[in-house]
Structure formats: C-alpha cells, structure tokens
Image: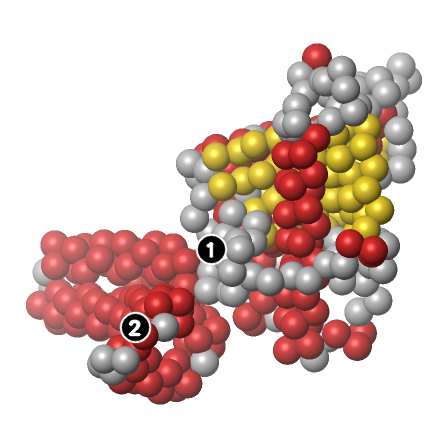
C-alpha cells in the first residue's frame, strides 16, 4: 500500500477505534440487542415517556454502530481495490481506490465527532457566559472579543443566538455577557470551551504600545427542559432587581426590570435583563440557575466516573485552556489537546470546530492529539 493510502487507513482506523472505545463496543452491542427486544414488547408504549427514551437510545446506538460497521466495510473494499490495481499495474484503479480512502478518512473524522456527542445533555441548547478577568479595560475588551467569537461560531453552524444578559465595561468591552445558543448539539460542542482564555497582544489602549496579557473566563451549561427536576428551596435564594444596561443604548430599560438570583448554599448566580418584564426576566434567571446546578452535577458525575473527582478542588472553569497570541507572532494554542492554529483571525471569527473536536476526543483517550496546525 502506498504511503498516501496507508495514511488514510491509519486515520480511519484511529477514528473507528476511538468511537468503539467511547461506546464500550461489546457492551453497546449487547445493549442494542436489549433495546431491540424491548421495542418488540407491545406494552412498551404504556409509558410514553419511557418509550421515547428507549427509542432515542436505540436510534443513537444503531446510528453509531451502523456507521462504524459501514465505514469498516467500505475501507476493506477500497483497500482491495487499490491492491488489485497495484497487482495489475492499473494506475486509474489505484487512483480511484486512493480517492475512496481519502473520502472515507474525511467521513470517519466527521462521524467520529458526531458519535462522541452522546452525553446526557449534549443534544440540548446551551447558555454560554463570558466574564472579564482582572485588568480593567484590557480584559473587558478581550471578553467582548470572546463574546463575538462564540456568536460567530454559532452563526457558522446555523445556530440561533440570543443575548440574555449583558454588563458593559467602564470604557470599552464588557464585564460579562450571557448568550443563549439554540441548535442541535449546541451544548455538546460548546461545553469544551469552559475555562480561562488568555490573550497576548499589543494593547490598543496603551499609548506606549506595550504587550499586555489579558484573561477572561467562559462557562457553558445546558438549557434543561421540564422533564429534568431540579429542587431549589425558595429560602435558599437571594433575589435582586436592578436597571438593565448595555452598549449603544441596547438592552437599556428605565425601570428595575433586570433580575439577579443567587443560590446561597452554592454561591451560584444567574441573571437576566433581556426582557422589559421583570417577571419574564425572573423566570429566565431561574431557568438559568437550575441549568447551572444541573451542569455542576453533570461535571461531578463525569469526574467521579473518570476517578478524578477527589483531586478536583473546583468543578467549574477555573483553569486555563487556550492561549491566543497576536504579538509578537500569530498563534492560538489549546493547552489541553495541543491543537494549534497560525490564523488567530480566523479563530476569533468563529473557526473553533477543530479545537472542539480535539477536546471531545481527548475526553475518551485522555491524551493530547498529534496536531500542530489546524489551518
């Protein structure tokens, strides 16, 4: 097999191996057999809610297992085609077989990411919060750049974006903002972005044109539906109202319609000022609070499952995940996965999918991916 073809085969095999590991292949096959048997039971739909869960899990496993088997079979056919061409000295047949392997490798990478989005809440819409770190105008400007980056990423994927909460900076940028991103697997992709993001650049606010380092934090949590019961005692809540504010006259009200809810036992805070109605903002803030508490529980379960919970002092975003260096050179580097880009302008314009895909893969392998440049 030529080096080009072997590289495609290695890519395909690596993607399929990752999905098999993620699914726990033998267990997944047994589970699909169990679900198929349950679907044949005429009493299944006596409980419609339970039946929908069964059908949803069955569809997910059928799709993932079917995709792995299909790609494996097509790869074997393409390899046979290339080997036949090599045996007969037929360059056209070899080229066709190599083309099929290349297309399969690209498909395997796409389908791998889709298969990894099988977490409990991955398919949900998501909230994404951006908070400026210490550093005044510099960090606040960086926070606004991040807000735009995630809005552009969402738009590239065809998602709908709403600005739920917004607090402008004193001179420029924002102190914080909350986006509501609606679309299939919005939380599954965006959850990989929770953490501290670091920017290095020549400051546009420094008359001496010195380099500055700024930090902002991102926190992502899923929008939950009424089927998920999060119990919150009214006595555990501190509710404040205030006047909404925003840049350029947007989201500005003349009454105290904005609402901030603090869950006293955990210190979790949720706020909304998107609506002119205080009642609607309170309902939105309460939903956000429940979603954040649900996300904290998801994180706890994930860490316990991986044996890391005891070593964690904080289930949240208190760790640096990515650096964006605009001077003296052009580089974005993910510190978890090792993925880099030498086109930070594209990344800041929403080209985040390679970083997200690598982070999803790392959750399965626990290893950095061997990628130097995503451009």
Residue closer to the observer: 246 or 368: 246
Q: Position of residue 13 (x, y in %)?
A: 37, 71
In front of the other: 237 or 160: 237
User: Circle 2 — which element?
Assistant: helix
Q: Report the Cα–Cα distance between label 2 and label 1.
A: 23 Å
Residue at mark 1:
123
Categorize mark 1 by other alpha carbons within 10 Å: few (<14), some (14-19), many (20+): some
Q: Which label sits on residue 45? A: 2
- Of 179 and 109, which appears nearest the observer? 179
What residue is rendered at 86% in x and 20% in y?
A: 170
Task: Indicate left or right for 213 with 123 as reference.
Answer: right
- Circle 2 Cα neighbour tier, 10 Å, few/some/many (<14 / 14–19 / ≥20): few
Residue 114: x %, y % from top left: 41, 58
Is residue 355 visible in this depiction of the protein? no
Question: In percent of the image, x 63 and y 34: which residue is there?
Answer: 280
Q: Residue 106's image quarter?
A: bottom left
């Amino acid at each position: 097999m030529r080096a080009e073809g072997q590289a495609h085969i290695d890519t395909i095999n690596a993607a399929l191996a990752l999905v098999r590991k993620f699914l726990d292949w033998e267990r997944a096959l047994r589970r699909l057999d169990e679900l198929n048997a349950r679907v044949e039971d005429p009493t299944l739909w006596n409980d419609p809610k339970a039946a929908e869960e069964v059908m949803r899990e069955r569809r997910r496993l059928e799709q993932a297992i079917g995709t792995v088997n299909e790609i494996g079979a097509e790869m074997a056919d393409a390899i046979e085609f290339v080997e036949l061409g090599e045996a007969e000295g037929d360059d056209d047949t070899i080229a066709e077989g190599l083309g099929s392997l290349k297309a399969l490798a690209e498909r395997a990478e796409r389908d791998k990411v889709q298969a990894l989005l099988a977490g409990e809440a991955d398919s949900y819409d998501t909230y994404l919060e951006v908070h400026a770190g210490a550093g005044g105008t510099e960090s606040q400007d960086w926070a606004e750049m991040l807000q735009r980056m995630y809005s552009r990423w969402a738009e590239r994927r065809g998602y709908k974006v709403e600005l739920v909460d917004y607090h402008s900076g004193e001179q420029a940028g924002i102190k914080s903002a909350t986006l509501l991103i609606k679309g299939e697997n919005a939380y599954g992709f965006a959850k990989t972005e929770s953490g501290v993001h670091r920017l290095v650049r020549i400051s546009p606010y420094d008359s001496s044109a010195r380099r500055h380092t700024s930090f902002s934090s991102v926190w992502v949590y899923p929008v939950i539906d009424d089927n998920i019961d999060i119990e919150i005692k009214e006595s555990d809540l501190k509710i404040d109202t205030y006047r909404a504010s925003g840049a350029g006259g947007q989201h500005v009200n003349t009454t105290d319609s904005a609402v901030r809810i603090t869950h006293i036992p955990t210190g979790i805070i949720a706020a909304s000022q998107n609506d002119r109605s205080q009642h609607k903002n309170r309902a939105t803030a309460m939903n956000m609070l429940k979603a954040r508490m649900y996300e904290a529980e998801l994180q706890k379960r994930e860490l316990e499952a991986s044996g890391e919970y005891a070593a964690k002092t904080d289930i949240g975003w208190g760790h640096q995940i990515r650096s964006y260096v605009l001077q003296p050179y052009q580089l974005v580097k993910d510190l978890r996965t090792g993925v880099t880009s030498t086109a930070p302008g594209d990344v800041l314009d929403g080209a985040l999918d390679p970083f997200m895909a690598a982070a999803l893969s790392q959750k399965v392998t626990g290893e950095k991916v061997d990628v130097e440049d995503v451009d």
